[in-house]
Image (cartoon, grey):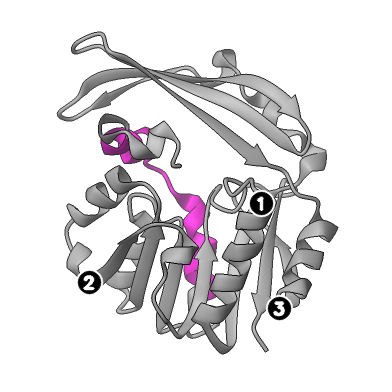
Amino acid sequence: MADECFGHPRLAAIYDPLDPVRGDLDAYIQMAEEFTAHRVLDIGCGTGVFALLLADRGIEVVGVDPAQASIDVARAKPGSERVRWICGDATALPPLRVDLATMTANAAQQIVDPTAWQETLRRAYEALRPGGHLVFETRDPAKRAWEEWNRETSYKVTEIPGSGAVESWVQLIEVSPPLVTFRWTYVFAADGQVLTSDSTLRFRERQDIETDLTAQGYVVEDVRGAPDRPGREFVFLARRP
């Protein structure tokens, strides 16, 4: 099940305006160039920002996401016809042969069930051509990012065309390592509607992830830092032999 911030039509429609600066995607664009990727599978594509950046560069892209509302937003964007959109998780993928598979932002951590995580890694492996790469990021649990997730540091009011002013903030609900649960609240000034979205992330240890990747047949080529969050995240580069 997709979180409400991705699956509720009104929240999916404002997802991009609430987070318009996506510098975190620059590193993924650079890796697509580094690996000379012509075909890319974007797992957890959301509203399609990364998929469309790739398509703008002439790359063939398949975007998959379990949230229909987010897929609908992606399909409504200019140039969306250049991307193959699939509503579902990695188990919904047709036979593919891609050069690169990605899980950007929090996509990897949102797969909290261990069985679903292993299945996602396996399906991504099957979709890759021999020599192809899986790239994804995940927060370093030791940095305890959740300690900054509170109303005081996150509260903002965003003026969104077509929606008006929207208040938003995050509050921590529960920390039960390796799981962390938090709630986003959105208040629409236009009609006073209040919507909430609860999310749970799994904070995996670096060694556990390397073990999971190796168990699925990958070769872990590198573990890099995230340029937009130096010292706070792991970026895994795994290859299908």
Instruction: Establish if 97 lies above or below 64.
Output: below
Mark 2 is surrounded, within 10 Å at the Cα level, by few (under 14), some (14 to 19) or many (20 or more) other residues, namely some
Q: Which amino acid does label 2 sit on?
A: Arg
Which residue is rendered at x = 59% and y = 78% of the image? 133
Residue at 81% from the left image edge and 51% from the top image edge: 205
Instruction: Say which mark, if any, is on residue 42.
Output: none
Residue 59: x and y, percent?
34, 78
* Quadrant into which the C terminus falls: bottom right
Amino acid beneath label 1: Thr
Quarter holding residue 15: top left
* Left or right of 106 in this view: 148: right
Q: In this view, does 84 lie above or below 184?
A: below
Task: Give yes or no for residue 121 being in the magenta stretch.
Answer: no
Magenta stretch: give its range. Answer: 12-31
Q: 128 or 21, which lies in front? A: 128
Q: Earlier in the sequence, mark 2 or mark 3?
A: 2
Q: Dot 1 lies on which element?
A: strand
In the depicted view, which residue is nearer to us: 160 or 12?
Answer: 12
The quarter of the rendered structure image containing the N terminus is top left
Which residue is rendered at x = 71% and y = 74% of the image?
216
Residue 22 covered by magenta stretch: yes
Cα separation, mark 2 vs mark 1, equals 29 Å
Which percent across, then down, holds residue 88? 39, 57
Circle 3: residue type: Tyr
Q: Could you tell me if residue 194 is visible in this image? A: yes
Q: Residue 138 carries which label?
A: 1
Q: Distance between the residues labelled 2 and 3?
A: 30 Å
Whichever of callouts 3 and 1 sits on the residue coming sooner in the sequence is 1
Residue picked out by circle 3: 218
Dots 3, 1 in contact, CB < 8 A: no
